[in-house]
Amino acid sequence: MPTDLDELGRRYIGALADEIAKWLKQISNDTSRNTPHPSFGHPLPSSDEGRGKGEGRRVLSSGARATGGENVEERPSRLPLLGERDGVRARQSSKSIIPTKGLHEGRSAPPVGVCFSGGIDSGSVFLITYHVMRKLGMSPSRLKAFTLNFGDGPDFQQAREFLDRLGLGLFLEPIEADLASIDVAEAIRVLEDYKSLDVECASMGLTLCRGIRARYPDWKFLIDGDGGDENLKDYPIEENPDLTIRSVVNNLMLYQEGWGVGRIKHSLTYSGGLSRSYTRTYAPAKQFGFDGFSPYTRPSVIEVAEGIPFATLTDMSVEKLYGLKGEIVSRGVKAITGLDMPVFPKRRFQHGALPQEKLRQRLPEQESAYRKKYLSLYQ
């Protein structure tokens, strides 16, 4: 594997784009899923000229409903391409690996929601999904970036800034929630585990999925960035006294497979690594009837990550390791899409959704409380 970050990024995000393309084509082939959601659609500004201020008609995308008594023009929806509002089309990479030969312009796709925080993983998944949908001739108006918003969590502002920098703020859809909607007992029951970080993360996932389901009763497909941290070893080493930079860099599949058979490092339920991570993402989505997809967990993407020469690229420096993920992913997104992806510091889902002091009002830090509740399910 080369040590050139641009080439590493192109291969890594290229594999991600291939997996997303396969998934989009697969879910689009089922015609029963192609019926537009009755409440889905982006209002578009009227292009009529010669109207005075305030005299324009409201334009609804196909499938949207007027509320009555309005002067409404209905036409097929199409979001403006990146940069069109400035009169410049987005520059796309000539090396894009998504084929367009034989595909039909305007090909339909079911609505797709990205579980979005504006972080490296969800941000790259959103941009690649947006890019691939356009390359496949699918309307990007079928895409939304769902962000959990308790009102004062940093993720919502980060998500807004991420999309606004690229002129894509139109895609952002906050899912509002309050502290009372967090149900610890439900999270433990759905997750079937008691580890603090996992219960916290699953609680946020359940709250997000509940909010999406309440707003869109028929929504089916979600896509997320799960697996990205494991692939590029982007977890805080200092939080685990058993880890060193050498053990992380030299252990090929540390975060995917845990510490090996017979060594209990996490809980008595899961072996560790992605078995827990997958469940805290998959289970909340399944609980509310969603069909979720985590492209970073696909074998072809993990295979590229396995070949990255971490020891050479980091010189056994923790700081370099923490910065490596943003470098590889952002360069890969640039190579595949031509877009300059914003990169923000890493933050866990639960810490981005809520300030930590508010998080502790509903989710205690002590694992013993969760374990007691977990054991009560089987007594």
Image (cartoon, rainbow, N blue to C red):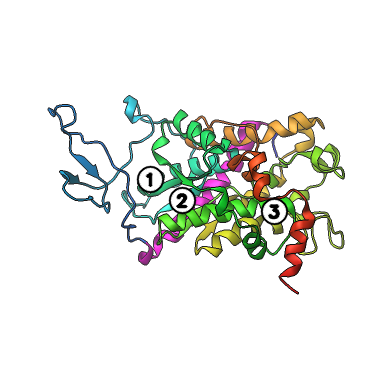
User: Considering depth in this image, is 178 or 314 the residue closer to the camera?
Assistant: 178
Drawn side of residue 212 relative to residue 191, left or right? left
Image location (x, y in percent) of residue 136: 40, 48
Split into 4 quadrants, where in the image is the C terminus?
A: bottom right
Left or right: where does residue 353 sit relative to residue 263? left
| Residue of label 3 | 198
Tag 2 and tag 3, C-beta contact below 8 Å: no
Location of residue 14 (image quadrant): top right
Q: Give the range drawn in magenta.
A: 4-33
Query: In the current view of this chain or complex, which residue is farthest to the bottom?
Result: 379
- The residue at which mark 1 appears reads as 140
Label 1: which secondary element: helix
Point 42% across, 59% down: residue: 219
- Near-viewer residue (245 or 356): 356
Which residue does the image show at 28% across and 46% down from the upper left? 77
Residue at the spot of label 2: 113
**Magenta portion: prevailing SS class:** helix
Q: Earlier in the sequence, mark 3 or mark 1?
A: 1
- The amino acid pointed to by label 3 is Asp
Position above or below: 376 against 237: below
Q: Which quadrant is the N terminus positioned in?
A: top right
Percent of width and height locating residue 236: 75, 39
Q: Where is residue 228 in the image (x, y as percent from the top left)?
A: 64, 45
Foreground disc of the pair 3, 1: 3
Q: In the picture, residue 154 is in which quadrant?
A: top right
Question: Which residue of the protein is positioned furthest toward the left in this rendering?
Answer: 50
Q: Can residue 294 be seen in this view?
A: no
